[in-house]
Image (cartoon, grey):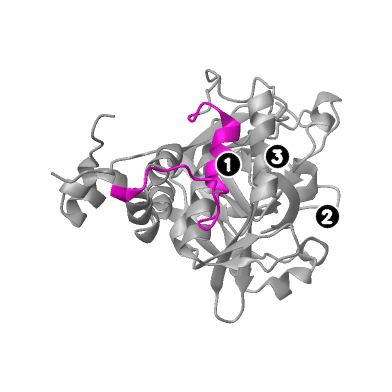
């Protein structure tokens, strides 16, 4: 048998670490950690899977703990290096491979509403009313200030999502003279989590209160111009954004349409969409008050099911012209079953089939 040489062991530890940090896919890190115990120690002890996630998705830096959920009635694993490695390696793949879907669940509040409930924010969630030619929309109160902004807040379908684009359809009043379109001049998006989860029991829509000050916005998008047109307009974010906490704010900036009846300026929205990847039930976020620590909960069994669905093509992904056309992606690691065995492997088990360090010859 030819002599086996581990080239990383020839290098200084810092240089070996630098070599492995050039890997830019979690599947490659999983493979590297299966080469030998020496390689595994570099990958896991330096948290390379976590670093890769944070490099690609900076919002994940706020996570302070990892909890690996057990499905065999044993105690969950809290923040061990091995469970953190498995969780972040799987999370990275989920953030890029889970199917795209509509991610808005419920409205939370509007900064103002002209006629409640007829012109409530809840009307922005169902596009079927537009197809049936019914006048279903949200309307702000009128203002003499053309720069007066408005905000709409929505709860997403999971408290851990990755959002890629947000779509907005300004409302055209076909029942008014000249069919005015009540668009805003521009729009900006924020994502984040509540300052206190207890305060969200309040019904802000019913009381007509603005909930803007109840949230911590951890991401703010650039400002996008809005066309004064009666169509669904797509605003693709510069990079996919991980929303930790599950809330989206749409900030409508500036007014362009005056209503003839009262001479005031309004903003009206017919429909809103947020498109991205919902990561539950494989992943979820848990906030601890008052410490404000953020825990990532990882369910390996649910992740395996989700990835098997991706592999089989039964992932319920969106099939709509509203989504960007992209070529189908191949799984980065070839055989899915082999990857799942590696990512779920326990350090005390026999799942890893690495070459023992003493089988390498140092020369």
Task: Tell whether position 282 is magenta.
Answer: no
Disc nearest the viewer among 1 and 2: 1
Q: Residue furthest front?
A: 1
Residue pointed to by mark 1:
341
Q: Residue furthest left?
A: 363
Q: Nearer the viewer, residue 168 or 344?
A: 344
Q: Earlier in the sequence, mark 1 or mark 2?
A: 2
- Residue drawn at point x = 81 percent, y = 38 percent: 136
Relative vertical location of residue 117 with respect to residue 24 in this rendering, above or below: below
Q: Within 10 Å of the Cα at label 3, are there few (<14), some (14-19), or many (20+) other Cα atoms?
A: few
Q: Within 10 Å of the Cα at label 2, are there few (<14), some (14-19), or many (20+) other Cα atoms?
A: some
Q: Nearer the viewer, residue 237 or 286?
A: 286
Q: Position of residue 168 (x, y in %)?
A: 63, 36
Q: Position of residue 58 (x, y in %)?
A: 41, 53
Residue pointed to by mark 2:
116
Q: Nearer the viewer, residue 207 or 92?
A: 92
| Element assignment for label 3 | helix
| Magenta segment boundaries in residue numbering | 332-358
Q: Quadrant of residue 346?
A: bottom right
Q: Earlier in the sequence, mark 1 or mark 3?
A: 3
Q: Position of residue 303 (x, y in %)?
A: 65, 44
Q: Nearer the viewer, residue 154 or 268?
A: 154
Residue pointed to by mark 3:
305
């Amino acid at each position: 048998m030819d002599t086996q040489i581990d080239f990383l062991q020839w290098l200084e530890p810092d240089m070996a670490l630098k070599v492995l940090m050039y890997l830019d896919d979690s599947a490659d890190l999983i493979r590297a950690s299966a080469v030998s115990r020496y390689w595994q120690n570099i990958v896991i002890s330096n948290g390379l899977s976590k670093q890769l996630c944070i490099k690609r998705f900076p919002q994940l830096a706020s996570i302070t703990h990892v909890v690996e959920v057990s499905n065999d009635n044993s105690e969950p694993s809290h923040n061990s290096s091995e469970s953190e490695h498995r969780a972040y390696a799987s999370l990275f793949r989920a953030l890029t491979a889970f199917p795209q879907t509509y991610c808005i669940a419920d409205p939370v509040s509007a900064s103002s509403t002209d006629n409640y409930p007829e012109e409530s924010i809840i009307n922005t969630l169902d596009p079927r009313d537009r197809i049936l030619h019914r006048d279903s929309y949200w309307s702000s109160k009128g203002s003499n200030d053309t720069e007066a902004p408005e905000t709409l807040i929505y709860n997403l379908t999971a408290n851990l999502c990755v959002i890629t684009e947000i779509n907005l359809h300004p409302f055209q009043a076909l029942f008014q003279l000249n069919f005015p379109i009540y668009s805003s001049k521009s729009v900006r998006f924020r994502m984040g989590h509540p300052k206190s989860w207890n305060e969200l029991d309040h019904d802000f829509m019913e009381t007509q209160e603005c909930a803007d000050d109840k949230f911590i916005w951890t991401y703010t998008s650039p400002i996008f111009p809005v066309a004064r047109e009666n169509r669904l307009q797509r605003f693709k974010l510069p990079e996919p954004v991980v929303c930790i906490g599950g809330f989206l704010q749409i900030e409508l900036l500036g007014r362009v349409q005056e209503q003839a009846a009262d001479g005031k300026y309004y903003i009206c929205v017919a429909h809103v969409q947020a498109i991205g990847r919902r990561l539950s039930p494989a992943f979820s976020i848990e906030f601890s008050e008052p410490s404000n620590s953020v825990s990532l909960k990882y369910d390996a069994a649910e992740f395996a099911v989700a990835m098997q669905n991706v592999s089989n093509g039964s992932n319920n992904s969106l099939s709509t012209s509203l989504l960007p056309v992209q070529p189908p992606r191949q799984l980065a690691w070839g055989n899915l079953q082999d990857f799942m065995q590696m990512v779920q492997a326990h350090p005390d088990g026999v799942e890893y089939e690495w070459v023992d360090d003493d089988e390498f010859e140092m020369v």
